[in-house]
Amino acid sequence: MKIESNKIWEWIDESKTERAELLAKYIPTQLYHSEENSCFARIFLMLYGDLEGVRQHFSINYSNSRGVTVGSYSRRLSLEKQELLDYLNTETNENVILWVREYVQKYLNKDIEEAEIFDEEIFLG
């Protein structure tokens, strides 16, 4: 079943804060730029990323979508950070930029620090 994104935006706008925060918990989190395909997460952040609760829930969702890591977790997170910072080089929307910067500062940097400690204990322990 395919739902048109315009219908989703209309539904959210009926109760913007509540519904945007709800969707932020569950939508696919992959961010990309493409001429051929729309990036749902990017459009979502463009429209609703001004809401702090949306950014917070999307950040948690983004963190939870990492999957399994084999090897150094801190290296994996450092690569994720670099990918997001590289993404900023081509991003123009203020809400998306705000989310990336906030996610890196509030969540990812802390996760990297904790992962470095974990890696040291596991690999040097």
Image (cartoon, rainbow, N blue to C red):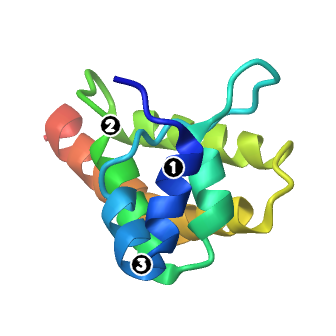
Q: Which residue is mark 2?
A: 73
Identify which amino acid the numbered label 3 is placed on: Ser
Residue situated in front as seen by the camera: 41 or 10: 10
Q: Is residue 96 visible?
A: yes
Residue in the image at 55% along x and 42% along y = 5
State the image coordinates of residue 43 (x, y, percent, origin top left): 65, 49
In this view, the mark in front (2 or 1): 1
Residue 18, placed above or below residue 116 = below
* Label 3 secondary element: loop
| Left or right placement of residue 28 versus residue 80 in this view | left
Identify which amino acid the numbered label 1 is placed on: Lys
Residue 75, placed above or below residue 45 = above
Q: Earlier in the sequence, mark 2 or mark 1?
A: 1
* Quarter of the image where the N terminus is located: top left
Q: CA distance from mark 2 to mark 1?
A: 39 Å
Identify which amino acid the numbered label 2 is placed on: Tyr
* Mark sitting on residue 15: 3
Q: Residues within 10 Å of mark 2 (few under 14, many from 20)?
A: some
Q: Earlier in the sequence, mark 3 or mark 1?
A: 1
State the image coordinates of residue 121 (x, y, percent, origin top left): 17, 45
Callout 3 touching callout 2 (CB < 8 Å): no
Q: Which residue is mark 1?
A: 7
Q: How many marks?
A: 3
Write down the quadrant of residue 19 in the picture.
bottom left
In this view, the mark in front (3 or 2): 3
* Label 2 secondary element: helix
Residue situated in front as seen by the camera: 55 or 119: 55
Residue situated in front as seen by the camera: 118 or 60: 60
